[in-house]
Each structure stands twice: as C-alpha cells, then as structure tokens.
Image (spheres, grey):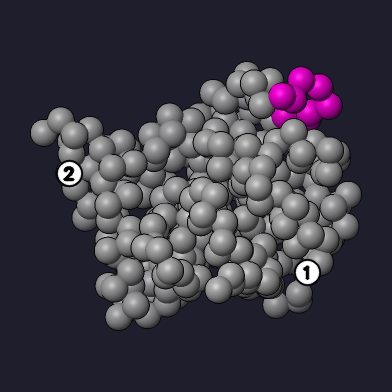
C-alpha cells in the first residue's frame, strides 16, 4: 500500500516567526531511487530550501512548499554537496524559485552547467572554511564537512531551532517496507544504529575527517539532527548520535584498504 506522508512543522521559535519544516515523503519513491528528505526553513516570511532533491520529487516539493510560503519568497537554496539526489532538479529550481540565491561549495559551482542550467542563476560559492548565511532576521552557519562523503561538503546549523541539517551524515538506510521519521529515546537510537552503520563506514572517507567535523559542530547546542536520508534524530537521540560518531573507527579508506 502506497504511503504518502504530509509535510509539517517539526519545530519553531517561541514567537512562531521561525519554522523548520519537513516537506513530506512518498514511500513509493523507494522504487525509483533512494528516499530523500527535503527541508524548508522560514524566518519572518523568508524561505530557504535545504537539499531540494532530484527530478522525480520536485512536483511534490513545490506543492509542499506552497502550503507554508509563496514560492516567490524562497530566497535561498542550500546545497550540501553535488550528488544528483541533492542537485538533480536544479533546472526546475531556477524556474519555480527564480529569486533564490544558490549556496554551494566553490568546488562544485563550475559543474552546474552540466545540469542544463547556463543562465539565470545567482550563485554564492561557499568557501572551504564555511560561512554565515542570513535568512530574514536569522543567521545560519554552513559548517565544513569535507570528505563526508564529498570533498566539497557542508552541513548547516540553525541556531534558532538548534537543528543541524547534516546532509549524508546521519543517513539511515531502511530495508524494504520499513520507514519511520523520528528517533528520540535511548532504546530507539540503539535499535536505529544498525540502519546507519553500514552507510557511515562505507561513505565517510576517514575517521580523521569525521573528527574534524565533530570539532566544528560540538560547539553548537544541537537538539535535532536532520539528515538527507532516513530518520531525524532529536532530543537524547541527537546527543547519542554525535557521541556514537566520535567513537566510529575503521571507516572509508581504512575500511577498504586496511
């Protein structure tokens, strides 16, 4: 049976002017490709899309965004890296979100024409050290996550709702017929690890890169970790996840070339 999950507000500021929105999911998409999460952050009427995804999710994405904000008020689009399940709909993004500034690693901006987009883009190249990105009255931080798994990779921290949009870090791969959105308590996290471990050992390049990223994010107060694939971890599970990563060894090149 096909299961379509509607978008909804995951968390918001006390005054209701800042929203973190999960944009829904169709479980049937697993038959077309890997399931992906798309996120929208709205601050005082200003919108930012985070990893809007590939071609076959785009219609659903636009419909979901329209439930919360006029698409013309989407002013920023954050691309964590260059994978097709992240940037594959870029030619449609330009058409439906014409006012949006594209934020992407400086390593990947010159590859954009290969996606069929040659004009009409306002691109800001994120430097290797990361940068602040203003949205309305909020300032979000692009945090370097190079080689996890892309050489030009960034995660995004939202200090208002204390959420770390973690791209492929934190991704979980569910077996056919299984899917859930949230992991929150200790018992659930320990059960959830088995859906993350294989991905993290194979796709993250090295424990050195991982530890460097952890130094960058552990200075923030993180209450929610929102990856591009799989379940969102929040509360105790978010803290346990970062602790689990800090002890993760034998990954990437060390796994393949011991």
User: Which residue is depicted at the point 76% across and 40% down?
Assistant: 93
Q: Label 1: which residue? A: 17
User: Which residue occupies 17% across, 44% down?
Assistant: 250
Residue 122 found in image quarter: top right
Q: Nearer the viewer, residue 221 or 167?
A: 167
Rendered residue at 72%/55% (across/down): 61
Of all residues, the one furthest to the front in this rendering is 1
Left or right of residue 121: residue 214: left
Whether residue 172 sits left or right of residue 16 in the image: it is left
Task: Write the start and end of the magenta stretch as one range.
Answer: 116-123
The quarter of the rendered structure image containing the N terminus is: bottom right
Question: Residue at 77% of width from left, 39% of height from top?
Answer: 92
- Left or right, residue 88 beside residue 190: right
Q: Is residue 154 magenta?
A: no
225 in relation to 211, above or below: below
The residue carrying pointer 1 sits among few (fewer than 14), some (14 to 19) or many (20 or more) residues within 10 Å by Cα, namely some
Decide which of 253, 16 is in the foreground and name it: 253
């Amino acid at each position: 049976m096909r299961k379509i999950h509607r978008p909804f507000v995951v968390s918001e500021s006390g005054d209701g002017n800042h929203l973190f929105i999960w944009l829904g999911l169709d479980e049937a998409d697993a038959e077309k490709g890997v399931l992906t999460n798309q996120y929208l952050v709205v601050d005082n009427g200003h919108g930012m899309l985070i990893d809007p995804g590939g071609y076959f999710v785009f219609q659903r994405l636009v419909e979901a965004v329209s439930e919360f904000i006029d698409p013309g008020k989407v002013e920023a689009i954050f691309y964590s890296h260059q994978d097709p399940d992240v940037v594959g709909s870029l030619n449609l993004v330009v058409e439906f979100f014409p006012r949006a500034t594209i934020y992407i690693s400086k390593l990947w901006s010159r590859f954009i024409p290969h996606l069929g987009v040659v004009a009409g883009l306002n691109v800001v190249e994120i430097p290797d050290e990361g940068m602040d990105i203003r949205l309305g009255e909020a300032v979000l931080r692009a945090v370097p996550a190079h080689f996890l798994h892309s050489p030009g990779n960034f995660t995004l921290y939202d200090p208002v709702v204390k959420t770390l949009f973690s791209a492929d870090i934190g991704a979980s791969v569910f077996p056919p017929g299984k899917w859930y959105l949230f992991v929150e308590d200790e018992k659930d996290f320990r059960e959830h690890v088995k859906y993350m471990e294989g991905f993290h050992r194979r796709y993250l390049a090295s424990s050195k890169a991982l530890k460097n990223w952890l130094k960058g994010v552990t200075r923030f107060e993180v209450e929610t970790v929102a990856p591009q694939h799989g379940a969102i971890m929040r509360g105790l599970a978010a803290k346990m996840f970062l602790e689990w990563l800090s002890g993760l060894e034998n990954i990437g090149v060390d796994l393949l070339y011991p």
